[in-house]
Image (cartoon, rainbow, N blue to C red):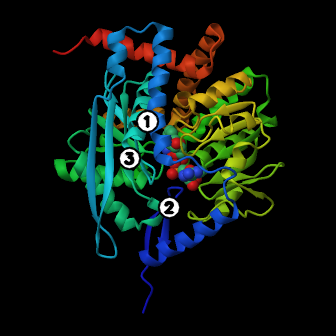
């Protein structure tokens, strides 16, 4: 009998041909388990649910600190501590083996004072309501810092896309979209890709929304394929933005980009594109990882060669000419710039004292805990915060939305030039305030962002 072959979305956003889903799931397990056994974490990992909950608590503490610094009035502070709207949905999906599996999904609007809510959609086993709330709040600050006219939103589904077939992922995405239709819309809330999702997932969301409304609504999502009205440069935008920020901080620190040794945790959309952009600038990628572990090479890794040789499901581990390291070891590699570009809560009080980088550029959302921030500050390690460092993605998403509304599409060089301008402006404002107030860059970025949201709140007044 001929083998059943289908295809699905891979870890790096590419389609990958697979055999039948049951075989594929078994193979995925086999691929992952031995690697985890080979490189056990140096310390027992923190329980994910706790980490996620901490992320929300941590976001509130950051807001409290900012509120007292900018003397934010109590009423506005109280309102900003709450998410405007949270939606929890169950998403039943007919799996390939015939049974129905029910997934938990979330969509949260933190705030809409400055415009429609905007934020990514995450597919990951560790998604929780607390994490999504924290990420939605981060989006409010990020859009305000970049001065783009959006509020903050985020969504997530608790699932492991690596073990699902393309058909299952499509069914999950379409049902989830249908469940959250009541709160999304091109002038209400515009989803985009995040961890575990990609342009294909956005295309399914767009199609589901358009089929339901009866006409094409391309502005319902950003990060969709260019063939459907996506923007040139959106896939690479977050990683490219990270490279602009690395160049800017290097200049402020008197470092030459060509001499930089960079370690990157995560090699998905953001990590791989940041690696490529930095390699093109002349920096040396001395370490990179994925969920299974990492690799290091003091003389540098060519990310173009690495990703050209890897299949979408392959781990970077075992790449010729490199040494295997665990994800924990990768964070502590000898390097100039450390770029966490995977999950949140990875730089904690347990490892902050061991970090050897001079600068941490947060490509992931929420990778550093508040306690670690304090240790890093005392150790004179500069942290370029997530709301600045990874804002290239939402900035080009904004460009995509604007292009879609105008039905007029820009050339790639125009998009990258505009992105560079927006990122540099936000970087310069944050850097200048952090020098003037003698505070870490995260504090400065939050001061700018929260002040802008508070100003909008004041102008709006309170309904009714
Ligand atoms: P992705 O799914 O394309 O890649 C995620 C990477 O992280 C993969 O290499 C995966 O193997 C690795 N990973 C997953 N779980 C891990 C774990 N427990 N430990 C170590 N590595 C793990 O996702 P992405 O789009 O590259 O997003 C990465 C980060 O960047 C996320 O924090 C996301 O919120 C943030 N971000 C993404 C965008 C965007 O445009 N995609 C924009 C802003 C911020």
Q: Give the percent coordinates (x, y) of residue 372.
A: 63, 31
User: For the residue labelled by badge 2, is the local secondary structure a helix, a strand or a loop?
Assistant: loop
Relative to 349, residue 11 above or below: below
Residue at which label 1 appears:
135
- Kindly indicate whether the residue at mark 1 contacts the one at mark 3 (C-beta within 8 angstroms): yes
Residue at which label 3 appears:
156
Do we see residue 178 in this rendering?
A: yes
- Disc 3 versus disc 1: distance between alpha carbons? 10 Å
Q: Between tags 2 and 3, which lies in front?
A: 3
Horizontal side of 316 relative to 453 (left or right) equals right
Sequence-wise, the earlier of marks 1 and 2 is: 2
Badge 1: few (under 14), some or many (20 or more) residues near its Cα, within 10 Å?
many
The quadrant the N terminus occupies is bottom left
Identified at 77% across, 64% down, the residue is 320
Which of these two is toward me, 101 or 431? 101
The quadrant the C terminus occupies is top left
- Disc 1 versus disc 2: distance between alpha carbons? 24 Å
Residue at which label 2 appears:
10
User: For the residue labelled by badge 1, is the local secondary structure a helix, a strand or a loop?
Assistant: helix
């Amino acid at each position: 009998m001929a083998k059943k072959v289908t295809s699905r979305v891979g870890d790096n956003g590419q389609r990958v041909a697979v055999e039948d889903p049951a075989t594929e799931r078994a193979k995925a397990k086999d691929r992952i388990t031995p690697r985890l056994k080979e490189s056990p974490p140096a310390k027992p990992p923190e329980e994910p649910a706790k980490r996620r909950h901490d992320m929300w608590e941590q976001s509130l503490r950051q807001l409290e600190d900012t509120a007292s610094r900018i003397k934010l009035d109590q009423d506005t502070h109280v309102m900003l501590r709450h998410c405007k709207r949270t939606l929890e949905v169950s998403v039943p999906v007919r799996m390939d083996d015939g049974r129905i599996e029910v997934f938990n999904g979330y969509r949260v609007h933190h705030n809409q004072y400055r415009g429609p809510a905007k934020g990514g959609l995450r597919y990951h086993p560790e998604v929780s309501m607390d994490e999504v709330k924290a990420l939605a709040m981060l989006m409010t600050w990020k859009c305000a810092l970049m001065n783009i006219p959006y509020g903050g939103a985020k969504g997530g589904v608790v699932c492991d896309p690596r073990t699902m077939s393309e058909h299952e992922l499509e069914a999950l995405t379409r049902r989830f979209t249908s469940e959250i239709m009541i709160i999304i819309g091109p002038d209400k809330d515009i989803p985009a890709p995040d961890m575990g999702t990609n342009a294909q997932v956005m295309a399914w969301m767009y199609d589901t929304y358009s089929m339901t409304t009866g006409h094409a609504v391309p502005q319902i999502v950003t990060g969709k394929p260019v063939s459907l009205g996506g923007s040139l440069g959106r896939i690479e935008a977050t990683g490219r933005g990270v490279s602009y920020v690395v160049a800017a901080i290097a200049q402020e620190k008197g470092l030459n980009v060509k001499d930089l040794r960079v370690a990157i945790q995560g090699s998905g959309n953001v990590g791989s594109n940041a690696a490529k952009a930095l390699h093109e600038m002349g920096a040396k990628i001395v370490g990179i990882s994925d969920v299974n572990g990492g690799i290091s090479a003091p003389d540098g890794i060519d990310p173009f060669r690495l990703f050209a040789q890897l299949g979408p499901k392959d781990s970077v581990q075992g790449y010729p000419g490199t040494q295997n390291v665990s994800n924990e070891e990768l964070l502590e590699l000898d390097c100039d710039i450390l770029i966490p570009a995977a999950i949140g809560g990875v730089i904690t009080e347990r490892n902050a004292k061991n970090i050897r980088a001079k600068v941490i550029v947060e490509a992931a959302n929420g990778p550093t805990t508040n306690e670690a921030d304090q240790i890093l500050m005392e150790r004179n390690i500069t942290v370029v915060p997530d709301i600045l460092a990874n804002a290239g993605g939402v900035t080009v998403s904004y460009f995509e939305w604007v292009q879609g509304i105008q039905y007029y599409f820009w050339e790639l060089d125009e998009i990258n030039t505009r992105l560079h301008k927006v990122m540099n402006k936000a970087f310069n404002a944050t850097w200048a305030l952090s020098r003037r107030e003698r505070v870490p860059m995260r504090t400065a970025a939050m001061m700018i962002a929260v002040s802008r949201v508070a100003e909008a709140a004041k102008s709006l007044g309170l309904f009714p």
